[in-house]
């Protein structure tokens, strides 16, 4: 395997951001992708005793054309051979179905749009995987997430902060915002200090077979298959009316579970634009009436929200930011979906399990079931599940 000198002398500075291993055993979640493989290499360079662990989280139709689990395992084993690390495959499908997929179906049945990747990180990758790694004798775990962990000391003692990844286009702190202090204390994100292009460059130079492998997208158990086709296998269709903002019937939907706020394609209204030239967007769901409301125009008022309420709140530090007061905190940024810039907002505390956000600028298609994640500069503070949004 190539040494650091044969790859790039700039890595000396980047590697210094990773604490020295001193022979400690670390279990790396090898997914078959380039990010986790390079993470394992970086940790070996820093003196860790590295073991790879491949997680199988889905068994239903995993031999179908849409599921890549089998190929991912082959890629993970091939990378482990090049890296010179042992690898074990472990099946977490039962835990995944119970802790993640069951909640996924409950949320969709209730008309919300959940983000299972957030729950998967908290319940599988940093709980079931962490527990298994500790049973293997590991002291730490590592993944290929683009995020960073900073150990800070204040009057309250030592605590761990979750920071954004250096690469703004790949930062995954949004998906990690439900991790606890105990989980962060045992975790490392070696590529969080790198840009994606640097990761691929390292992979090419050390001869990893997955150096050019395409990044995985979407939810792991759905793969590239049509989403509605997949969801219909688990949730029944319950047709109802599609209405415009004036209550005029435009057509029929197949079931509220199969639509999300802001959706433009697949509504079922054909090419109808009602003479305005503007496309239709899903704007509201009325569960009691089983009605789907649509509006025309990307910036229709029904699609914009200035406030939201969130529940099931998790603070990475264990408590809400100390600055929270009746007047709110005006210096926070929030994401109501993964791929968006921070939106400036004020945070208002409610009960211990909730908060409200007031945005300086209206936010588009704020969707119940998704996560509202809060930031203070580079630090991810935590977040909650969006319950409702208001204009």
Image (cartoon, grey):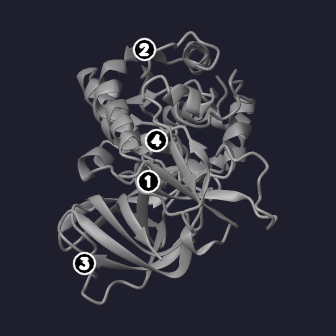
Lower position in the chain sequence, tag 2 or tag 4: 2
* Front label number (2 vs 1): 1
Mark 1, secondary structure of its residue:
loop
Q: Is residue 121 left or right of residue 302?
A: left
Q: Is residue 166 among the parts visible in the rendering? A: no
Tag 3 and tag 4, C-beta contact below 8 Å: no
Q: Label 1 vs label 4: CA separation? A: 14 Å
Residue for badge 1: 370
Residue for badge 3: 322
- Residue 386 is drawn in which quadrant? bottom left
* Front label number (2 vs 4): 4
Lower position in the chain sequence, tag 3 or tag 4: 4
Q: Label 3 vs label 1: CA separation? A: 25 Å
Q: Label 2 vs label 3: CA separation? A: 43 Å
Q: Label 2 vs label 4: CA separation? A: 34 Å
Residue for badge 2: 89
Residue for badge 4: 257
């Amino acid at each position: 395997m190539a040494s650091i000198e044969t790859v790039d002398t700039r890595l000396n500075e980047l590697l210094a951001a990773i604490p020295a291993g001193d022979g400690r055993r670390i279990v790396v979640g090898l997914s078959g992708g380039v990010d986790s493989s390079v993470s394992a290499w970086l940790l070996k360079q820093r003196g860790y005793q590295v073991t790879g662990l491949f997680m199988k989280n889905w068994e239903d139709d995993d031999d179908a054309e849409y599921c890549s689990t089998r190929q991912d395992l082959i890629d993970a084993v091939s990378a482990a051979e090049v890296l010179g690390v042992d690898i074990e495959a472990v099946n977490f499908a039962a835990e995944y179905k119970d802790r993640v997929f069951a909640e996924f179906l409950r949320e969709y049945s209730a008309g919300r749009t959940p983000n299972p990747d957030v729950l998967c990180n908290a319940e599988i990758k940093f709980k079931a995987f962490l527990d298994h790694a500790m049973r293997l004798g590991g002291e730490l775990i590592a993944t290929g997430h683009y995020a960073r962990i900073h150990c800070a000391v204040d009057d309250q003692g030592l605590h761990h902060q979750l920071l954004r990844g250096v690469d703004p286009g790949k930062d995954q702190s949004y998906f990690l915002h439900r991790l606890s202090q105990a989980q962060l204390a045992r975790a490392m994100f070696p590529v969080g200090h790198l840009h994606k292009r640097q990761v691929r460059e390292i992979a090419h130079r050390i001869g990893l077979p997955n150096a050019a492998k395409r990044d995985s997208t979407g939810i792991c158990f759905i793969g590239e298959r049509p989403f509605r086709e997949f969801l219909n296998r688990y949730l029944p269709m319950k047709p109802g009316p599609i209405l415009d903002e004036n209550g005029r019937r435009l057509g029929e939907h197949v079931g509220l579970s199969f639509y999300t706020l802001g959706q433009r394609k697949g509504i079922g209204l054909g090419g109808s634009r009602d003479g305005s030239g503007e496309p239709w967007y899903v704007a509201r769901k009325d569960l009691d009436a089983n009605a789907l409301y649509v509006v025309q125009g990307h910036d229709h008022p029904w699609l914009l929200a200035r406030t939201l309420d969130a529940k099931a709140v998790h603070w990475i530090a264990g408590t809400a930011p100390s600055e929270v007061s009746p007047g709110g905190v005006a210096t926070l940024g929030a994401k109501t979906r993964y791929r968006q810039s921070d939106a400036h907002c004020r945070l208002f505390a409610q009960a211990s399990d909730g908060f409200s956000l007031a945005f300086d600028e209206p936010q588009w298609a704020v969707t119940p079931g998704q996560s509202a994640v809060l930031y203070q500069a580079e630090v991810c503070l935590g977040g909650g599940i969006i319950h409702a949004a208001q204009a």
